[in-house]
Amino acid sequence: MTRLFNDPAAFADEALEGFTAAHRRWVRPVTGGVVRATATPAGQVAVVIGGGSGHYPAFSGLVGRGLAHGAAVGNVFASPSARQIHSVATAAHGGGGVLLMYGNYAGDVLHFGQAAERLAADGIETRTFAVADDISSAGPDESAKRRGIAGDLPVFKAAAAAAEQGLPLEEVLRVAERAGVRTRSFGIAFSGCTLPGADHPLFTVPEARMAVGLGIHGEPGIGEEALPTADEAALLLVETLLKELPDDVADPAGRRAAVILNGLGSVKYEELFVVYRKVAALLGDAGVEIVDPEVGELVTSFDMAGISLTLTWLDDRLEELWRAPADTPAYRKGALGDPEPDRDRAAATAGQDTAAAQDTAVSDAAASGTTAVPVASDASRRAAGTVLAALDAVARVVDAHAGELGRIDAVAGDGGHGIGMRRGSSAAHRAAHDAHRVGAGAGTVLTRAADDWADKAGGTSGALWGTILRSLGTALGDRDAPDAARVAEGVTEASAAVRRLGGAEVGDKTMVDVLVPFADALAAATAEGLPLAE
């Protein structure tokens, strides 16, 4: 379990602060994460990776020459917000465009997609790529639905090494796609992880048993088997991965593979080496040539007792990129000379830093209610008081039931929903309070609450609730007193926006199953002339 922390809600921010203080040779902090300490060379594609905290050395530990140019870092097991990703990517951009890379999780897909749209609106050419290597999370015919686990590393590295060679954005993306379709991972666990401040793990495994097919967010896996010996564990991992080969690898014999035996948090390195000796022997017996294997903690899950095996099937080009040098706080390979100073680029970066700092100042000021607010009518300011009361009620109810929300989520997910909802609703209430205090109207109160909910909650819920509140805020505005028709319009747009963003429809067992009938019923009733309260 996590024993050393202050406020659990501040754990991720404080960990990132300590990380940057310890690794100033490689990284510098920016709003939302970190970027390389040295400027991105002019014209080079910036590879920006990211995801939730709790997976170190992913993601911040992989920032440095030869690997990522920046990393957006979310809260524990929660994706960074679109605003955080946009900030990191803007700071990392060197004029050659940006490739956003992340594991294939709903929250990451939503937030990185939104960030890509914002970057494009800023005139920065941007592409996205989600790593989907966990074979236990979907079958071969639905590989696009798979989760991203330790296969993140070889796919990130291939794209970053291609960017380092000066390839244009579309070619860097093609390299990522090539590495992605040739990467497979599979994992097992012996106990779940315990988040900071929690008094029990996200899942438990019975004595003398192991969970099979786990994720990296505390997901309990797809089944259980008897506790194996080290050799038996190696056999399960290797045999499972060799059963599913890429389309152009009919037989593993004579093929090359980058091999990663990954520790998920509390399996000791000596144990990993005992397992790897058998992994290497089994792959050798199958005729696989192992290229630059990695054994250690590379994508973790706090203190989860578990391991995963990743194979990336190499061709000549992917082998070149896998062997390419890299120098980051947590991953180093080969040798890189000292970077040459580029005064013009440094000046440009200084300008980017100033812009990022200004953006940070604006968002921080908004959070404290010190920025100027749009002119609002008296009626809209009075309505803002009702909005504030509603958000206060939401925050209190969520806080009272955060444990139950997490328990429900842990049945099939990562167990972090209660924590995320608590962070998001509390942040939204604080932002609404600060905006209301300085005379904001209902629309501004809602949009500021939306931004802070999305930023602090992260994950899927952060993106969706931020969208809901922003839709309502846009509909209400700051000029007029909200009436029933305008509220119904905002709820209808929120319903449509959630479906656009998340891709769910009624019947998919999501919040849409409640939101759509509520929006439809409200619209119908207001069209009949019923007062809003009714």
Image: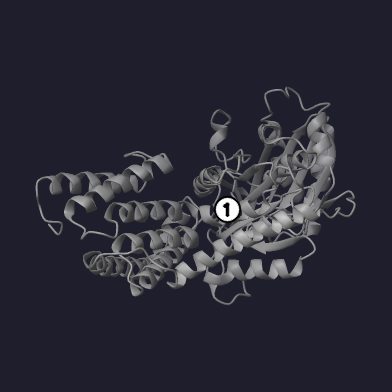
Picture residue at 35% right of the left edge, 61% below the top: 444
- Left or right, 372 with respect to 183, comes to left
255 or 127, nearer to the observer: 127
Locate the C terminus and report the quarter of the image it occupies. bottom left
Q: Amino acid at mark 1?
A: Ile
Residue 393 seen by the camera: yes
Residue 426 x, y percent position in the rendering? 41, 68
352 or 314, nearer to the observer: 352
Dot 1 corresponds to which residue?
A: 85
Q: Say above or below: 97 vs 486.
A: above
- Left or right, 419 with respect to 358, comes to left
Q: Say above or below: 252 vs 107.
A: above
- Left or right, 142 with respect to 307, comes to left
Residue 420 x, y percent position in the rendering? 46, 61
Q: Dot 1 lies on which element?
A: helix
Picture residue at 59% right of the left edge, 68% below the top: 13
Locate the N terminus and report the quarter of the image it occupies. bottom right
250 or 73, nearer to the observer: 73
Q: Label 1: how many residues lie within 10 Å, few (<14), some (14-19) or many (20+)?
A: many
Residue 509 seen by the camera: no
Residue 142 x, y percent position in the rendering? 54, 31
Q: Farthest residue in the left direction? A: 529
